[in-house]
Image (cartoon, helix red, strand yellow):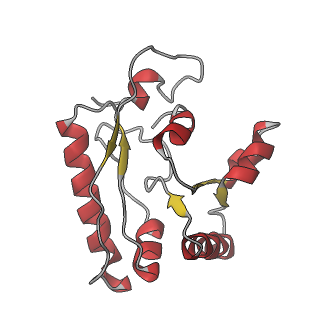
Amino acid sequence: ISYLDAAIVPKAFRQKIRPLGKAEMSRVPVFGFIYRNAIVTVDRSSPENRANSVRVLKSLIGKGISVLVFPEGTFNMGTTPLKEFYDGAFRVAIETRTPLKPVLFLDAYRRMPHESLFRLNPGTCRILYLDEIPVQGYSPEQVTRLKQEVYEIMEKKLVEYQASWPGS
């Protein structure tokens, strides 16, 4: 929900991780070089490109490297705590039998709204690590059910902890 998310990630995780990010960001001068080498990129313009990203994610998981996915896929510009999730992360979790570990950045939007790269507000950035969600018992046909359950858990906690988003 904020450009600050990328700066919070290294402080939030003390283990090997590889975030999933938009391929378009790799074209930004200088930043793009760093981005390409740190992020698993996804180019949603074609099924082949999306399938390649899924193969890379599965390979990383197979090596014991955690994958960080922002399931909304972009900034939430609506008035609800979350926008609709994409299926990809949930499908990969079910197929690899990898539990989900939702993490919420509660104040990133309050500190640095996505509307401006140059508007930064002082204060604490709280991080909430939610309970692990096992995927055993889910089949690939139940991606929508898993996605909805995770959405509801995350939305409830965002409201409970008075997180910030454009409509809050």
Residue in the foreground of this view, choosing between 43 and 38: 38
Q: Quadrant of the N terminus?
A: top left
Where is 105 relative to 111, above or below? below
Residue in the foreground of this view, choosing between 101 and 79: 101
| Residue at x-position 46% and y-position 41% | 12
| Residue at x-position 28% and y-position 57% | 151
Where is 163 relative to 21, above or below? above
The percent coordinates of residue 164 (x first, y second) are 32, 30
The percent coordinates of residue 50 (x first, y second) are 62, 70
The percent coordinates of residue 139 (x first, y second) are 33, 85
| Residue at x-position 52% and y-position 62% | 66
Q: Residue furthest top?
A: 122
Residue in the foreground of this view, choosing between 119 and 64: 64
The number of numbered discs placed on residues in the rendered structure image is: 0
Residue in the foreground of this view, choosing between 38 and 113: 38
The percent coordinates of residue 80 (x first, y second) are 28, 41
Q: Residue furthest front?
A: 14
Q: Quadrant of the C terminus?
A: top left
Q: Is residue 127 left or right of residue 19?
A: left
